Amino acid sequence: MDIEEAAKKEVERINEIMKNVELKNEKAREVFELAKSYAKDANYFLKEKKFLQAFEAAVIAWGFIDACLHLGYVEIKKEEIKKWFTI
């Protein structure tokens, strides 16, 4: 898999995650907003064909959501998406 394919895959996955994640605790609002911002950036970079940056931004967004999920600050609404995480 080349970087373009990897970027498209990760951006697609973070978009699906962001559509199905819900903030449960206001303590994590700032981190949640950072995740949303990185996801938005990932889409922008993908559109601009900056595939490495798109991949990186998607993975960073994923990391923020994963941390919030482990701390119980967010909830993933779709069961099939929950399987993507290690909780």
Image (cartoon, rainbow, N blue to C red):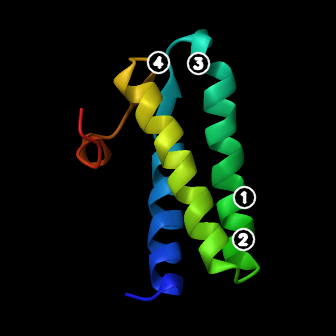
Tell whether 23 sits left or right of 40.
left
Around disc 3, counting alpha carbons within 10 Å, would you say few (fewer than 14), some (14 to 19), or many (20 or more)? some
* Viewer-proximal residue among 27 and 78: 27
Around disc 1, counting alpha carbons within 10 Å, would you say few (fewer than 14), some (14 to 19), or many (20 or more)? some
Q: Which is more N-terminal, label 3 or label 2?
A: 3
Q: Which residue is the site of mark 1? A: 41
Q: Which residue is the site of mark 3? A: 28
Extreme residue toward the bottom, this view = 2
Distance between the Cα atoms at labels 3 and 4? Answer: 6 Å
Q: Three-letter amino acid code at disc 3?
A: Ala
The reply to whether dot 4 and dot 1 touch (C-beta < 8 Å) is no
* Residue 39 percent location from the top left of the image: 63, 52
The reply to whether dot 3 and dot 4 touch (C-beta < 8 Å) is yes
Instruction: Tell me what residue is drawn at x 46 percent, y 26 percent.
Output: 68
* Residue 51 percent location from the top left of the image: 62, 79
Q: Which is more N-terminal, label 1 or label 3?
A: 3
Q: Secondary structure at mark 2?
A: helix
Distance between the Cα atoms at labels 4 and 2? Answer: 28 Å
Q: Which residue is the site of mark 4? A: 73
